[in-house]
């Protein structure tokens, strides 16, 4: 199931950091590793999981591979979060009311 793959991929903080780096533009695996204490094989494994979840896509340029965020892969997450958008304003209003009552 694709949604399980997406949430499994995003559950790991290293993979979230990789997606964050890719949000600024296309990069190869070496550039992605900069500033991260991660081996090349570990980076490859993380990229494989992200590709499997369709959150990242790759583009080959000769012997180099560049990675970028796959906007289509983020559609499911956006749709899933939309369901909960209406939930938060009511909860925040309830919390404000509770805090106001506690102050009095």
Image (cartoon, helix red, strand yellow):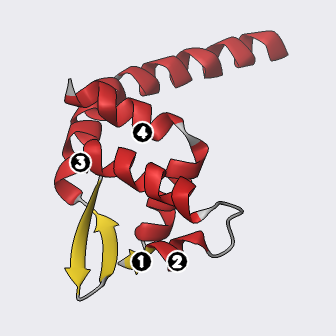
| Residue drawn at x 44%, y 27% as measured from the top left | 89
Give the residue number, with chain letter if any, for mark 4. Answer: 9
| Residue drawn at x 31%, y 77% as measured from the top left | 65
Depth check, mark 1 against mark 4: the one in front is 1
How many other residues sit within 10 Å of disc 3, few (<14), some (14-19) or many (≥20)?
A: some
Precedes in sequence: disc 1 or disc 4: 4
Q: CA distance from mark 1 to mark 4?
A: 19 Å
For the residues labelled 3 and 1, say whether their Cβ atoms are less than 8 Å apart. Answer: no
Which picture quadrant has residue 57? bottom left
Residue 69 at x, y = what percent?
A: 31, 63
Depth check, mark 3 against mark 1: the one in front is 1
Q: Is residue 88 above or below residue 28?
A: above
Which label sits on residue 54? 3
Q: CA distance from mark 2 to mark 3?
A: 21 Å
Precedes in sequence: disc 4 or disc 2: 4
Give the residue number, with chain letter if any, for mark 2. Answer: 30
């Amino acid at each position: 199931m694709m949604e399980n793959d997406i949430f499994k991929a995003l559950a790991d903080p290293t993979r979230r950091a990789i997606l964050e780096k890719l949000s600024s533009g296309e990069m190869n695996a070496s550039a992605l590793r900069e500033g991260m204490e991660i081996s090349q094989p570990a980076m490859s494994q993380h990229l494989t999981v992200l590709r499997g979840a369709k959150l990242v896509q790759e583009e080959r340029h000769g012997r180099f591979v560049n990675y970028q965020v796959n906007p289509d892969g983020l559609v499911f997450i956006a749709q899933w979060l939309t369901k909960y958008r209406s939930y938060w304003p009511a909860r925040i209003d309830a919390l404000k009311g509770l805090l106001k009552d506690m102050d009095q």
